[in-house]
DNA sequence: AGTGCGGCCTGTCCGC
DNA sequence: TGCGGACAGGCCGCAC
C-alpha cells in the first residue's frame, strides 16, 4: 500500500522520464475509480507538455499549462513507465501516452485511487485545500503539533492519521512512529505532556525518512515489472506483529482497534 | 468544530 | 479442491 515514501519514490522515478515531454494521448480503460475519470481529462491533456511533477501528501501532481492532473494511488495503486509493447493487464486503468514513446500506466486493483483533472489552482481544490503540513517540512514541528492537539479528545493515533494534522501518515507509520516515540496510541491527543510532541515529531520524520531511503533504492529500476515496493518489507517493528515479542523488551505486543484501524503497541515501552 | 463511522473495492488468507 | 466470509487499507462525506 502506497504510503508517502512510496508516492515520493514514484514521483522521483517518473519525473525524469516525463518532465518537459508532450502527452500524445490518454487512454482510459476503466473510468470507475474513486471518482469517475471524465472524458474531458483525455481531451484536455492531449498535446499538453508536463511542466512539473510534484507531490502534496499522497497526491501526485502533473502540471501542464492548461491544468493539473491529480493522481492518488489509494491503497493498491501504482504508476509505472512502460513501453508501448507492454502487456495490458486487468487492472491497468489509465495510460498516459507520451510523444517520445513511454507510457505512464496507472494500475489499481481496488480502485480506491483517483485520476482527476483540475484547471483552477490545484491547491484550492477541495481534496488539497485542507491538508496539513508535509511531515518532512520544518512546518511540521512540536509547536505546531502541540497547538493543534490542544483540547483534542481523539486518540493520538487517530489525530496523527488525520490529514488535516499532517499528511502522509497512514496506519503503518502511525503505529511505527508511536512505538518509536514510546507513546500509547489510544491516549487523547490533547493530554500529551508538553515534551512529548518533540519526540513524536522526530519519530514521524525518522520513520518516514527511513522508509524513503529504502524505497528509493528498491524502486530505482522503474520499468521493472516486479513492482512490489521493497520498503514495505523493511523492519517494521510493530505493524503486523500483534502477539509477537516486542523487539525492545520482549513483552507480547498488544493488538487493538482504534477508529476501526488495526493498532499494535507495546504496553511496557509505550506509555 | 470536533468526532465517529459507513462505504467504496478486490486480493489474500482462513476454515470448512 | 472449492467456496464463503473476514479482513486489510486511505480517506471522503455524512450524521450527530
Image: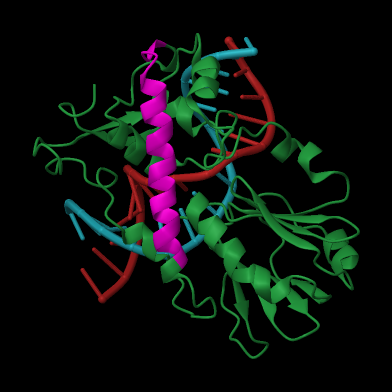
Chain colours: A green, B cyan, C red
- The dominant secondary structure in magenta is helix
Q: Position of residue C5 (x, y in %)?
A: 34, 46
Q: Residue at x 56, y 74 (%)?
A: A90
Asked if residue A205 is among those painted magenta in the image, a careful observer would answer: yes
Above or below, comparing residue A185 to residue A242 in the picture:
above
Q: Quadrant of the C terminus of chain A?
A: top left
Q: Is residue A54 visible?
A: yes
Please tell me whether residue A72 belongs to the stretch shown in magenta: no
Q: Residue furthest bottom?
A: A85
Quadrant of residue A20 in the image?
A: bottom right
Residue depicted at 73% across the width and 34% down the height: A129
Viewer-closest of A36 and A10: A10
- Is residue A93 in sight in this rendering? no
Horizontal arrangement in the rendering, residue A250 relative to residue C14 (left or right): left
Residue A32 image-quadrant placement: bottom right
The magenta-colored residue range is A191-216
Q: Which residue extends farthest left? A: A250
Amino acid at each position: 500500500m502506497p504510503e508517502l515514501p512510496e508516492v515520493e519514490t514514484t514521483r522521483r522515478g517518473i519525473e525524469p522520464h516525463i518532465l518537459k515531454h508532450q502527452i500524445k494521448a490518454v487512454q482510459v480503460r476503466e473510468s470507475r475509480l474513486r471518482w469517475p475519470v471524465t472524458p474531458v481529462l483525455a481531451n484536455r491533456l492531449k498535446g499538453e507538455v508536463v511542466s512539473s511533477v510534484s507531490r502534496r501528501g499522497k497526491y501526485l501532481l502533473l502540471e501542464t499549462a492548461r491544468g493539473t492532473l491529480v493522481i492518488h494511488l489509494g491503497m493498491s495503486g501504482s504508476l509505472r513507465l512502460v513501453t508501448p509493447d507492454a502487456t495490458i493487464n486487468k487492472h491497468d486503468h489509465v495510460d498516459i501516452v507520451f510523444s517520445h514513446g513511454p507510457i505512464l500506466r496507472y494500475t489499481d486493483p481496488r480502485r480506491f485511487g483517483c485520476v482527476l483533472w483540475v484547471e483552477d489552482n490545484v491547491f484550492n481544490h477541495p481534496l488539497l485545500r485542507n491538508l496539513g503540513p508535509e511531515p518532512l517540512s520544518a512546518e511540521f514541528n512540536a509547536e505546531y503539533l502541540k497547538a493543534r492537539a490542544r483540547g483534542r479528545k481523539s486518540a493520538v493515533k487517530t489525530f496523527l492519521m488525520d490529514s488535516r494534522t499532517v499528511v502522509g501518515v497512514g496506519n503503518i507509520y502511525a503505529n511505527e512512529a508511536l512505538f518509536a516515540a514510546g507513546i500509547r496510541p489510544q491516549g487523547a491527543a490533547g493530554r500529551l505532556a508538553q515534551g512529548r510532541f518533540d519526540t513524536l515529531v522526530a519519530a514521524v520524520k525518522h520513520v518516514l525518512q527511513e522508509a524513503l531511503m529504502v524505497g528509493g533504492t528498491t524502486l530505482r529500476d522503474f520499468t521493472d515489472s516486479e513492482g512490489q515496493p521493497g520498503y514495505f518489507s523493511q523492519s517494521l517493528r510493530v505493524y503486523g506483529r500483534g502477539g509477537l515479542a516486542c523487539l525492545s523488551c520482549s513483552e507480547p505486543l498488544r493488538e487493538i482497534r482504534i477508529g476501526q484501524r488495526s493498532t499494535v503497541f507495546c504496553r511496557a515501552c509505550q506509555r
